[in-house]
Image (cartoon, grey):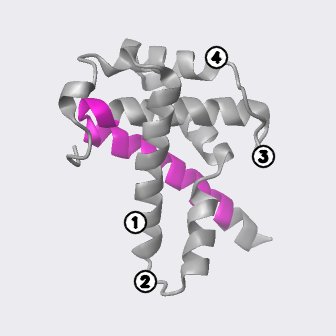
Amino acid sequence: MFGFIDDEKIPEDPARMNEIVLAYVGDCVYELYVRNASVGTGEPRVNKLNRMSSLKSRASYQAEAIKKIEPDLDKTEAGVVRRARNKKITSKPRNAEPMDYKSATAFEALVGYLYLTGNNERMEHIIGLAFEESEKEEERKDEK
């Protein structure tokens, strides 16, 4: 891990943590990957970097990524995803359909769970799927 979280304050089994807390952690980790990828393009303008980052952070991309990986989830991962998706939404999603928002929350919870368990290879695979979705969407837009 990055060393920012006190390992003694994380439960032995992060899968039993509150799914919204897992999604909160997953959102932060995912955003760091997104921003790193944007900066890696060499773009020097922050407003352009922000636009690039916001494209990859869309709930619809995260929802598609979790749909792709769901058949390959182990029992624990599937439980984290199911609980996060079924969690009652207490806020209205601004730029997403409610089902995409719930699936994106499940995606973020899974990323958070994998981060906290140190399963970085699996986490990066899942993040890569979301990146693929955003790239496919950009290609479709370019073709129009």
Task: Answer whether residue 134 is magenta in the image.
Answer: yes
The residue under the point 53% across, 48% down is 130
Residue 114 in the image, given as x and y percentages of width and height: 34, 32
Disc on the earlier residue, 3 or 2: 2
The residue under the point 76% across, 40% down is 93
Amino acid at dot 4:
Asn
Answer above or below: position of 107 versus 40: above
Compare residues 59 and 10 and report the one nearer the observer: 10
Amino acid at dot 1:
Asn
Numbered tag placed on residue 94 in the rendering: 3
Position of residue 82 in the picture relative to residue 89 (left or right): left
Answer above or below: position of 21 versus 144: above
Residue 15 in the image, given as x and y percentages of width and height: 37, 18
Q: Mark 1 points at which residue?
A: 36
Measure the C-alpha gap from mark 4 to mark 1. 31 Å
Measure the C-alpha gap from mark 1 to mark 2. 11 Å
Position of residue 132 in the picture relative to residue 98 (left or right): left
The residue under the point 77% across, 32% down is 98
Measure the C-alpha gap from mark 2 to mark 4. 39 Å
Q: From the viewer's perspective, is the residue at label 2 or at label 4 nearer?
A: 4
Magenta residues? 115-138
Disc on the earlier residue, 2 or 4: 2
Check if mark 4's residue and mark 3's residue have beta carbons within 8 Å.
no
**Image quarter in which the N terminus is found:** top left
Assess disc 2: are there few (<14), some (14-19) or many (≥20) residues with their C-alpha within 10 Å of its C-alpha: few
Q: In which quarter of the image is residue 116?
A: top left
Amino acid at dot 3:
Arg
Q: Mark 2 points at which residue?
A: 42
Task: Answer whether residue 125 is magenta in the image.
Answer: yes
Q: Name the residue under label 4.
A: 86
